[in-house]
Amino acid sequence: MKNEFPLLDRLVGPDDLKTMGGEELHQLADELRQGLIKTISRVGGHFAPNLGVVELTVALYKAFNLPQDKMIWDVGHQCYPHKMLTGRWDRLATIKQYGGISGFLRRDESPYDQWGAGHASTSLSAALGFAVARDLRKTDERVVAVIGDGALTGGMALEAMLNIGAQKSDLIVVLNDNTMSIAENVGAMATYLAKLRLSPLYQRVERKVKNSLHKDGLLYKTAAGAKHAATHFTAPANTGLFFEELGFQYIGPIDGHDLDFLVAVFEHAKMLKGPILLHVLTTKGKGYASAEADQRTFHAVTPFSVEDGKMEKKVTGVTYTQAFTETLNEMAASDEKIVAITAAMPDGTGLAKFAEKYPDRYFDVGIAEQHAVTFAGGLAAEGFTPVCAIYSTFLQRAYDQIVHDICLQNLPVVFALDRGGLVGDDGATHHGVFDIAYLRHIPNLLMLSPKDTLELRAMVRWALSYKRGPVALRYPRGSGEVISETPAVIEVGKSETLMRGSDLAILAYGPIASVALEAARELRAEHGIEAEVINARWVRPLDGAMILRVARTTRRILTLEDGVVHGGFGSAVLEFLAANSVTDVEVRTLGIPDHFVEHGPVPVLRGLCGMDKAGVLAAAADLLDRPEIAPRTPGEAAVAAGRV
């Protein structure tokens, strides 16, 4: 059988590219692209952004010496070719799978992953740190940051650019400009880059640069000549002026799929001193027609048919995101004060549907969560009802703005925290497990979470009608069973009893209440134990009357949450009991333990954290001193069930 990927299969690491000529480099790029298409179509993962950086990655690793030179990638959406060239091609099919390689960059996975990245706009700050460390050591390695144009909408990236220009360390920034974040880029920076791309001088300038670069195989023989030629030939009058004013030497725009030209530009950029910005134009989804035609859909994919691009549908039923968006749209129809804000995630948060119906009341602010929150505050101060729909893990980036700009001023902003809890295959950088702990102690903020999608709809309606201060509404990724078809009545600080019992009380916060019910039913059916199951609904304020009642009647409380135990819902219950001098009650808290959780299917991760049914049964056995209830640990139960 013919070897489909002869170069990739024998590649050990980036050093192997040093001996390859132009023809082999082109073949390697073709193998990378076909390897991506073949593998990701089977296992899923980030797709279109990786197809767009194939030639760019090959050219970088041909020109620079890794890991001696430092290559700092932003976000990680475009790291698959990097992984394939750094010894992980044989494991690409395990990407984002439990026990497999990460879908993002991780320092503990490979010496070539020199900076861990799962959130956007971090590469420039980190790269400056690497560059200054080099200067202090007085070594001579090169430092390169690769950042997408979407990440430049993040304020942190612009802060770093200001510092880089002032620091004047030798540092190369490669701006991968494909006009896209996950969706289309927004903001003045996107407009500025578009003007550079559309310059009528672009084609003429590129031809002139190519002629210069290939004259006698050299740009110029001296660094001074290289500097002059790069800036003179590649940047016509006023092109890149913004970057030059910040202290960068601007080179571009450059065709990001012209492999030979890229290698030549990178080889000569190494000769320049100070901060350099190379503006590289790429096509997201390059080489796969369906991905080029629909870059948003193919940004990240489930397994799909290579022939027609049709994807498998993994989620069944109404998702929490759909329930949120549908209810938001219904409420907005009768309330013109409702506005919606996203930070470059219109599809993931569901707000793309809101944008279709109410374009004048929809705002995508780019990858700028801090700005999104304070912008919402300004709207709220003027009588509007802003809804900030932001993934839990990304809202972490705006903590000070939540405290200082919203809660301190008690402004009625609704925070829709999508992806609350474990999210699965995106792993530690994307699990939304810290929000309960980082929000529940802030004065004026109310925080609640539904047991199912039907209750979420009721909570959205309530939150939009509450005008007395900020509200954080937390819900998970995907869909879940509807526990009750009875419409919920939402009252501040009031929980809901799902099952009555007197032997112990299981207090569950959010959709993980379904796990509590499952365990309670088994306790009753198999062991004759009557557990009371409470849908807590609120973490701020707590239902204190309920907690005191179950403490008196059962003397045993088990809390369950899809978030970190330290500082979470269980901690809040313990604090309440202590504040009320309730000492004759035993409490066990179940949730995310004190470590970062890997990527993998949510049921597997819950089992490993002891917060699935087996974990609840084990905790109940401990509380009741009934070891026969759960003879195996949660981890052993997960293994026995074939989930690990």
Image (tube, rainbow, N blue to C red):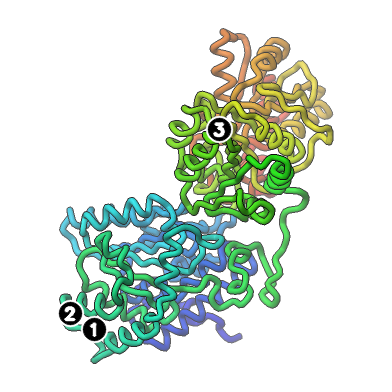
Q: What's the CA distance linking mark 2 and mark 1? A: 8 Å
Q: What's the CA distance linking mark 3 and mark 2? A: 57 Å
Q: In the shown orientation, is residue 197 left or right of residue 426? A: left
Would you name the residue on which mark 2 appears? Answer: 225
- Other residues around mark 3 within 10 Å, as few (<14) / some (14–19) / many (≥20): many
Q: Nearer the viewer, residue 420 or 643?
A: 420
* Label 2 secondary element: helix
Across and down, in percent, residue 304 comes to: 68, 68
Amino acid type of the residue tagged 1 in the rendering: Leu
Would you name the residue on which mark 3 appears? Answer: 436
Q: In the shown orientation, is residue 20 left or right of residue 43? A: left
Across and down, in percent, residue 371 comes to: 46, 45
Across and down, in percent, residue 640 comes to: 69, 44
Marked residue nearer the N-terminal end (2 or 1): 1
Amino acid type of the residue tagged 2 in the rendering: Gly
Q: Is residue 101 above or below residue 455?
A: below
